[in-house]
Amino acid sequence: MRPRKLIHAVLVALALLSEVGPAASAAPSPPDDAVLAGLCDGARAGVVALFERVPGVVVTSAARDRAAEARAWAGRVAKKRTWLRILRAGRDGTLAPVQAWIDAHWREVRGRPEPIRAYLAAYFDTLTDAEMAALSPHAGGRAVDLRKQRRLSRALLRRLPNRTVVLDEGDHWHVTFRCAP
């Protein structure tokens, strides 16, 4: 084999190994405590079951505080003004003032997540914990985002205990779980 082809083969093998994670015979690794922190019991059970089925799965986001939620939303809104409408969060009108602010300031904030993040963070601080949890499953400890990996599929994620929603958000999977009231 030529050196160039050998290097390419090694790089491809390393990329596949990093995506596949530990060998199938490896004992399942439990999720990190940081992943489980802030998740409700139903979400925690779903995440633990996922780690048992797919060792090495990468959780990119789980329970979020208000600042983290504002940061996550701002990046999306900066790219697409109507993202809040698409998200359908706040169908009860909770987000109407935020959408009105975005619409009024779109020329200044388009493509700039920082001013949007600051506005969202200030707005989220006006909400009660119950309102925030109703607005966002991440804020309510009911959701996780997962890095897309070859071993993860919609069918596998739909079989997780307490799972209510599985969304393909382009660069990651979003899974929402049922939690006791």
Image (spheres, rainbow, N blue to C red):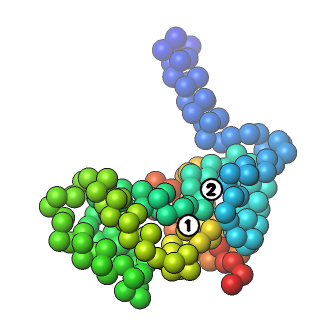
Q: Residue 60: percent from the left, percent from the top?
A: 56, 51
Q: Is residue 133 left or right of residue 86?
A: right
Look at mark 2 in the image and give the residue it sits on: 152
Question: Visible in this render: residue 156?
Answer: no
Type of amino acid at the residue the image marks with label 1:
His
- For label 2, the SS is loop
At 60% from the left and 62% from the top, the residue drawn is 63
Task: Say above or below: 61 vs 123.
Answer: above
Q: Residue 78: percent from the left, percent from the top?
A: 29, 58
- In the rendered structure, are the residues bearing label 2 and label 1 in contact, judged by CB atoms less than 8 Å apart? no
Q: Residue 38: percent from the left, percent from the top?
A: 67, 63
Type of amino acid at the residue the image marks with label 2:
Leu
Q: Nearer the viewer, mark 2 or mark 1?
A: 1
Task: Kindly identify which numbered label has been placed on residue 164.
Answer: none
Q: Is residue 167 left or right of residue 39?
A: left
Pointer 1: residues within 10 angstroms few (<14), some, or many (20+)? many
Quadrant showing the C terminus: bottom right
At 79% from the left and 55% from the top, the residue drawn is 52
Q: Is residue 4 left or right of residue 165?
A: left
> Label 2 vs label 1: CA separation?
20 Å
Q: Residue 5: percent from the left, percent from the top?
A: 51, 18
Look at mark 1 in the image and give the residue it sits on: 138
**Relative to the observer, which residue lies in front, 110 or 124?**
124
Q: Residue furthest bottom?
A: 92
Pointer 2: residues within 10 angstroms few (<14), some, or many (20+)? some
Question: Visible in this render: residue 31?
Answer: yes
At 69% from the left and 58% from the top, the residue drawn is 37
Q: Sequence order check: which comes first, mark 2 or mark 1? A: 1
- For label 1, the SS is loop
